[in-house]
Image (cartoon, rainbow, N blue to C red):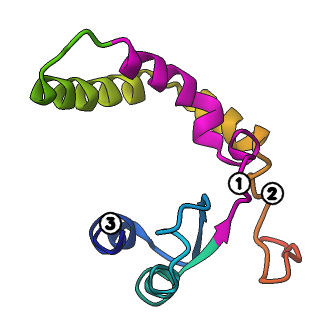
Amino acid sequence: MQEWIDNVWAPDIQGPSVLVLDSLKTHKMECIRTRLIAHAHTSVVYIPPGITGLSQPMDVSIGIYMKYVLQNGILTDAAQKRRHIAMSVLQALEEVKEVTIRNGYLKGGLVATGPRDMESNRHATS
């Protein structure tokens, strides 16, 4: 997870951000939270177990399609399966429409309606 933070997440962060994580034990380790705050200017919010469908927009919007594509492979060799999974994920992501992702965030209630401070008070834009 630390490698992912350093090599994938942190390089693209342009300012303060929030990362919504599930309750996986690794996600809840103090060293992970500290690294996200210190190296990626990222606050962490943990979702309670059992509410993925309500709080993770990618699962709501494209997860079902991706799971279908990944589960319907007919390959038996481990290397073929890994390649199939990688190619299927790429194909599924390429086919997802922007509006589908946007709707997933809307359904998850994770759409900001304007600039806010730490207490969620809205600020007027110029």
For the stretch drawn in magenta, what is the main secondary structure? helix
Is residue 73 shown above or below 39? above
Image coordinates of residue 72 in percent, x first then y, are 37, 11
Task: Kindly identify which residue carries mark 3.
Answer: 4
Q: Is residue 104 magenta?
A: no
Amino acid type for the residue under numbered disc 2: Thr
Task: Name the front one of labels 3 and 1.
Answer: 1
- The answer to the question of whether label 1 and label 2 lie on touching residues, with beta carbons closer than 8 A, is no
* Dot 3: element: helix
Q: Residues within 10 Å of mark 1 (few under 14, many from 20)?
A: few
Disc marking residue 49: 1
- When the figure is inspected, residue 44 is found, relative to residue 37, above or below; the finding is above
Residue type at numbered disc 1:
Pro
**Residue 40 occupies quadrant:** bottom left
Establish if 87 lies above or below 26.
Answer: above
Could you tell whether 67 is left or right of 82 in the image?
A: right
Residue receiving disc 2: 113
Magenta span contains residue 56 = yes
Left or right, residue 70 beside residue 62: left
Return the x and y of residue 104 as percentages of the image width and height: 68, 36
